[in-house]
Image: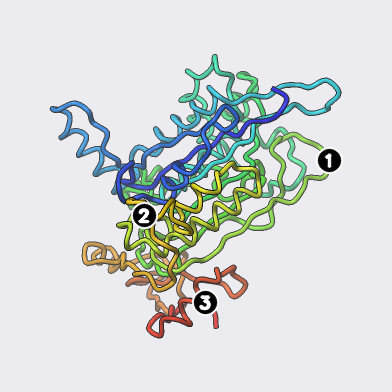
Amino acid sequence: MTKPRNIVICLDGTGNKIQENLSNVLKLYRVLEKSDTQIVYYDQGVGTLGQIYTWGWLKQKIKSGLGLAFGLGLDRNVIRAYQFLVNHYQEHTVRGQTSPVRDNIFIFGFSRGAQTARVLAGMIYEIGILAPEQVHLSGAAFTAYKQASPPLNPDETIDEKLYEGEAANFRRVARTKVGAIKFLGVWDTVNSVFVPNPKGFFPPLTRENPPHTAINPAVKTFRQAVAVDEFRRMFRVDHWTPDQNFKPNIYAQGKPEPQNASEVWFVGSHGDVGGGYKRKQSGLSQFPLIWMMDEAKKSGLKLPNRMAKYVSGVKPWSVKTHYLYPEPDVKAPLHKSLTWMWWPLEIIPKSVKRREWPKRKSLFGLYIPWGEPRFIPKDANIHWSVKERISECPKYRPVNIPK
């Protein structure tokens, strides 16, 4: 190995799988070059049916429902992706070079798959990468990762004492390799993974916040496509912390380089940004797909141009093509995700500490979300397609777009 390979991990969203209505993760998976120099992994989303046995359908239905509702199965998906990485990742020392030649790691995800991607990236930073003969320790490595305590400021010189504990002990004993993520690309990260509340009985469930999912020095380039028109309380976006440095080795000395991170806002609800609707109604989701592919190509992701243009709807494969992908269209249907089945959750009081929209009034430290808009700061990166839709569609006037 004289040149690094690309290892690409694609993690789909809740309930997404290989089917006709493709998510952007699955579109990307189809487009990617798959060769000896670019090894690709795809995992269907949390809550996806996968039972092959006739009498196992009821058990699988229950597990699928729990996955869709609470994120059950996310840990398993992280471990599977990590095992794939362990089995394929390579690094070699080259004579005359001070640092080894390492494979390039690309990770993509949508929705809870985006959360899965960020947890995987956090595990790579905190634990490192096991050797292939240690793959059976992946579950133990994940448990150790979850017991890690992230530093308050990852850009400061880190004393080893800050990392004493299960994660540091595991990393030391297993002698794992340092892992660096060249590109982490996600569509609308949603962290709706609930676990029993360790602090008491009320509330009985609480959101899980694994280490390094918002601050991760192992990520060189981070990109997130965010939905302007998502209002559900269970689909609040998890933002990335800006102004980080790239320093994958926890104990490395010297001045690190700045991390390249960007979040861009796109027209539509959660599914309009990450895909998954019927092909003819997916014109909006093509914009964040094209943007993500263009950004990843700058980091060395291999995408055959003809296939990329075909899947993104820019250019048909031929005049006789039967399976056509929709063209990017700012006037395409915008799907309303806050349907009647979600409204009961919107009237449950919520702590003002989690309030995003300032116009929601509070009482005794609580407020009613009631379809709360996402807050967009004045200095946010808003994709040109948002402005063009506002210009082309008089009825499209998002209240959260900065004036």
Of callouts 1 and 2, the N-terminal one: 1
Looking at the picture, tell me which residue is in the foreground, 328 or 400: 328
Task: Compute the Cα span from label 1 to label 2.
Answer: 51 Å
- The residue at the point 59 percent across, 54 percent down is 294
Q: Residue at x 34, y 51 (%)?
A: 323
Foreground tag (1 vs 2) = 2
Which element carries disc 1, helix, strand or loop?
loop
Instruction: Please give the name of the residue rendered at 47% of the width and 65% of the height, measured from the top-left corner.
Output: 353
Look at the image and tell me in which quarter the N terminus lies.
Answer: top right
Q: Label 1 vs label 3: CA separation?
A: 43 Å
Report whether 53 appears left or right of 112: left
317 or 81, nearer to the observer:
317
- Residue where numbered disc 2 is placed: 324
Where is residue 204 drawn, in percent x and y? 31, 48
Label 2 neighbourhood size at 10 Å, few (<14), some (14-19), many (20+)? Answer: some
Q: Amino acid at mark 2?
A: Leu
- In the displayed image of the protein, which residue is found farthest to the bottom? 394
Residue position marked by numbered label 3 in the rendering: 387
**Residue at position x 43%, y 55% in the image:** 316
Q: Identify the amino acid type marked 1.
A: Gly
* Marks 3 and 2, how far apart at CA: 27 Å
* Helix, strand or loop under label 3: helix
Q: Nearer the viewer, residue 155 or 17?
A: 17
- Residue 390 location in percent, x, y? 46, 80
Q: Residue furthest top?
A: 133
Of label 1 and label 3, which has the lower sequence position?
A: 1
Q: Nearest the camera: 39 or 226?
A: 39
The residue tagged 1 is: 254
Circle 1 packing at 10 Å, graded few (<14), some (14-19), many (20+), is few
- Amino acid type, mark 3: Lys
